[in-house]
Amino acid sequence: MPARNAIIANVVGRRRLTGAMALTMTAMNVTRVVGPAVAGALIGAAGVTVAYSINVALYALALAGMMAVGRAPVADRADSSLLQNMAEGFRYVREHRLVLVLLFFGLVPMFLVMPFQTLLVVFAEEIWEVGPRGFGMLSGAAGIGGVVGAAFVAWRGNASRRLRLMMTSVFAFGLLMMGFALSPWFWLALPLLLAGSAFQAIYTTLNNTAIHVLIPDSVRGRVSGFLTMSFSLPMLGAVPISALAEVWGAALSVGLASLLAVVVAVVFYLASPDLRRMDLSILKAFREAIVLDADRPSGARPASPAARRTAGGE
């Protein structure tokens, strides 16, 4: 995943990064909805072996598609060891406060709220008593919401006021998920989950894109490694949230964690002047990208005035 994120940023350039990241998130969320349904049908019709064989074939097709991506010179070809590369990544993040803040801002709310996915089966079986079919509907609603949110970011493009949308999305995500967890009715919880997942996709896509826009190519892969923790850390968050669910119940545990995520977002915003200046930093990076993209190995020409306006968020 870190390598894939770095490749996307290098292939499309910073000015097109928002749409590229949003399309990537859209595809990932589509697989959350379509993948289990198709796999279940294949297993039922032909067995597990056939389903896995088709999956392997799809990986082969993806690798074949990657062969069409042209190579570009590596930004930093220094002969460094693995530990030296890791140390350089840590040093860069420590010295660039906005990148550090965005990394934590992307990780902490996800750590608190996303473990709800592990507890969906508890909500379906014990709280609303809707069984496997209801569990499938909940999982599908979360996936569809993610598709809608990521598609919205792709449609919006490089519009201005990213910080306002990102903060609005994380607030809405936390509050909607709190409403979902505490809802006494399944049919009310379902749209709340869909909407909450849409705002989560918006917030995550904007946060990830902001980091990739701000960092230089020389450390992109290393910082992408930290960024990818946002996909893995929620798995660790499932441990304390599940332990609390044993004592307080799943609904109260997820509800309190969602509320805490909103509080954490407020603290991040109030305590970090760098975060509050994020839009200006991204605008500066976009303007620099117009010059850098003109010198890319692909031979891309300098951006047109319309592209400059788009890059500037005008």
Image (cartoon, grey):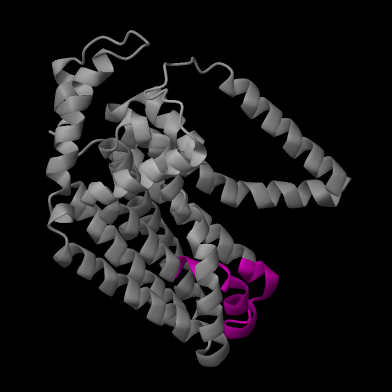
Asked whether residue 206 appears in the rendered view, the answer is no
Q: Quadrant of residue 281?
A: top left
The image position of residue 200, as x and y in percent, is 38, 58
The image position of residue 89, as x and y in percent, is 38, 43
In-front residue for pair 87/307: 87
The image position of residue 220, as x and y in percent, is 38, 35
- Tell me: 274 left or right of 56: left
Residue at the image point whose x is 18% and y is 14% from the top = 304
Q: Is residue 13 above or below residue 241?
A: above
Quarter of the figure with the C terminus: top left
Asked whether residue 199 appears in the rendered view, the answer is yes
Secondary structure that dominates the magenta span:
helix
Residue 121 magenta: yes
Residue 32 magenta: no
In-front residue for pair 215/205: 215
Q: Is residue 13 above or below residue 126?
A: above
The image position of residue 59, as x and y in percent, is 68, 33
Q: How many marks?
A: 0
Q: Is residue 33 above or below residue 13?
A: below
Q: Which residues are magenta?
A: 113-135
Q: Quadrant of residue 78?
A: top left
Residue at the image point whose x is 18% and y is 63% from the top = 269
Residue at the image point whose x is 14% and y is 34% from the top = 284
Residue at the image point whose x is 86% and y is 44% from the top = 49
